[in-house]
Image (cartoon, helix red, strand yellow):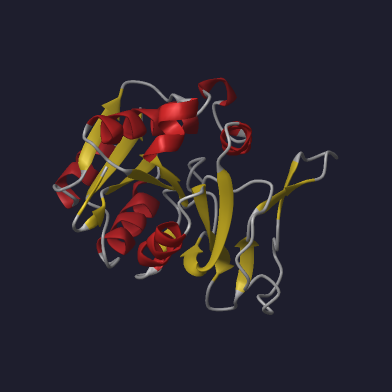
């Protein structure tokens, strides 16, 4: 499912009553080189006029208007299914409050080109790029009060997470997934509504034989809060 220009990547962004954050996300996406071939924005039943504003501000995106809030998993699945039906060879899931570095997608694709055995790729994600404070560098499991622990959370970036490796799981924020993963295991589990669906998706992918790769030179900034409407 690739052509001479490389993989056909579609980005999927879910918005719920957070149009300012989503517009910042989409502006950053438009500045990436290469940009995604198609950007699917799913409006999850917002009541703040988000969908009308986004359709005016970003006429080139594919806007899906849902009549009610189906949660992150349900909303994302609408965009994922549309992208797959259009022949996308990879899906880039982005939280609407995340901002991709201009070369983030190129770095993820470079990692993917050299690792056909890997199905899911995750970037290095900062809470604040200016102060080099991290949000997530892959996910590990602790089986304590919180099932998943974001590796590097709230640490200063001191170089310890600069090596690509294969963590037990990846966050759904900035996750690049090959088409083959969805074809083999299906979409996100909508019973989770919001949160944990990414850990479940990664676990199902691993159980199906796909490997997961953390790609530290692909960078996102994710201050947080936008997915839940602040």
Q: Residue at x 34, y 28 (%)?
A: 78
Q: Residue at x 25, y 29 (%)?
A: 85
Q: Is residue 214 above or below residue 50?
A: below
Location of residue 214 in the rendering, given as x and y in whole percent from the top left corner: 58, 59
Q: Is residue 39 left or right of residue 229?
A: left
Q: Is residue 36 above or below residue 131?
A: above
Location of residue 8 in the rendering, given as x and y in whole percent from the top left corner: 25, 49
Q: Is residue 97 above or below residue 33?
A: above
Q: Residue at x 63, y 67 (%)?
A: 134
The answer to whether one can see residue 97 in this image is: yes
Location of residue 226 in the rendering, given as x and y in whole percent from the top left corner: 48, 48
Q: Quadrant of the N terminus?
A: top left
Location of residue 143 in the rendering, given as x and y in whole percent from the top left corner: 83, 38
Determine which quarter of the picture holds residue 137.
bottom right
**Count of all numbered marks drawn on residues in the image:** 0
The answer to whether one can see residue 187 in this image is: no
**Looking at this view, is 180 or 136 the one in front?**
180
Q: Is residue 45 left or right of residue 169?
A: left
**Looking at this view, is 185 or 190 the one in front?**
185
Q: Residue at x 47, y 66 (%)?
A: 218
**Looking at this view, is 173 or 128 the one in front?**
173
Q: Residue furthest right?
A: 144
């Amino acid at each position: 499912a690739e052509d001479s220009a490389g993989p056909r990547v579609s980005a999927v962004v879910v918005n719920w009553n957070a149009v300012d954050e989503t517009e910042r996300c989409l502006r950053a996406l438009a500045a990436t080189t290469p940009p995604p071939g198609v950007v699917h924005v799913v409006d999850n039943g917002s009541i703040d006029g988000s969908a009308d504003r986004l359709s005016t501000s970003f006429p080139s995106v594919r806007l899906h208007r849902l009549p009610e809030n189906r949660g992150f998993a349900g909303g994302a699945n609408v965009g994922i299914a549309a992208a797959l039906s259009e022949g996308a060879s990879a899906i880039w899931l982005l939280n609407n409050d995340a901002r991709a570095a201009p070369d983030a997608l190129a770095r993820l694709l470079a990692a993917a080109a050299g690792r056909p055995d890997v199905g899911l790729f995750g970037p290095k994600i900062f809470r604040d790029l200016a102060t080099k404070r991290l949000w997530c560098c892959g996910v590990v499991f602790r089986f304590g009060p919180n099932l998943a622990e974001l590796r590097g959370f709230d640490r200063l970036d001191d170089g310890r997470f600069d090596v690509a490796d294969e963590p037990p799981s990846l966050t759904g924020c900035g996750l690049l997934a090959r088409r083959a993963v969805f074809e083999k295991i299906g979409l996100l589990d909508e019973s989770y509504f919001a949160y944990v669906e990414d850990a479940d998706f990664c676990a199902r992918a691993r159980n199906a034989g796909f490997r997961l790769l953390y790609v530290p030179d692909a960078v996102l900034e994710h201050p947080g809060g936008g997915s839940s409407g602040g």
